[in-house]
């Protein structure tokens, strides 16, 4: 994004261009995408497809980047579910998925 676009992004809100640039930098550093090069451990994503707090596309993008790096990724998509899971069936599905993931990921192999 060029500086003139940044300067006009939030016209009238009292932010300077430097403040806006810093806000965007903080936003990026706060995102898991900013540390993608350090990810090594297997990961389980659980995401409602109607989440209005974290855009579902962000999980898709993060998953894609991790898979490209060779990180083991599993995911559970909760249809018609929001960020905090409102439905009992979603809580049950989430608990089962997490237990299964930990069991298969953390349990040492049988001898």
Image: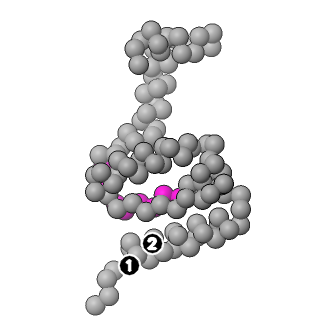
Q: CA gap, disc 2 to disc 1?
A: 7 Å
90 drawn magenta: no
Q: Where is residue 7 in the image (x, y as percent from the top left)?
A: 49, 11
Q: Residue at x 55, y 58 (%)?
A: 77
Q: Quadrant of the N terminus?
A: top left
Q: Is mark 2 on a helix, strand or loop?
A: helix
Q: Is residue 59 above or below residue 11?
A: below
Q: Where is residue 87 in the image (x, y as percent from the top left)?
A: 71, 62
Q: Please give the range of residues in magenta.
A: 38-46
Q: Residue at x 63, y 9 (%)?
A: 12
Q: Where is residue 94 in the image (x, y as percent from the top left)?
A: 58, 66
Tell me if residue 63 can be seen: yes
Residue 2 as seen in the image, left or right of residue 82: left
Image quadrant assignment for residue 54 = top right
Marks 2/1 in contact by CB < 8 Å: the verdict is: yes
Q: Nearer the viewer, residue 101 or 18?
A: 101
43 drawn magenta: yes
Q: Residues within 10 Å of mark 2 (few under 14, many from 20)?
A: some
Query: Pointer 1: what residue?
Result: 107
Q: Which residue is drawn at 50% across and 18% down?
A: 20
Query: Pointer 2: what residue?
Result: 102
Q: Position of residue 72 (x, y in %)?
A: 34, 62
């Amino acid at each position: 994004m060029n500086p003139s676009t940044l300067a006009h992004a939030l016209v009238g809100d009292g932010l300077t261009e430097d403040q806006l640039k810093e806000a965007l930098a903080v936003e990026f550093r706060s995102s898991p995408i900013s540390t993608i090069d350090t990810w090594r451990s297997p990961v389980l994503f659980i995401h409602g497809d109607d989440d209005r707090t974290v855009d579902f596309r962000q999980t898709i993008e993060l998953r894609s980047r991790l898979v490209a790096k060779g990180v083991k990724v599993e995911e559970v998509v909760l249809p018609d579910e929001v960020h905090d899971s409102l439905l009992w069936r979603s809580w049950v599905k989430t608990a089962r998925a997490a237990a299964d993931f930990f069991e298969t990921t953390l349990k040492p192999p049988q001898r």
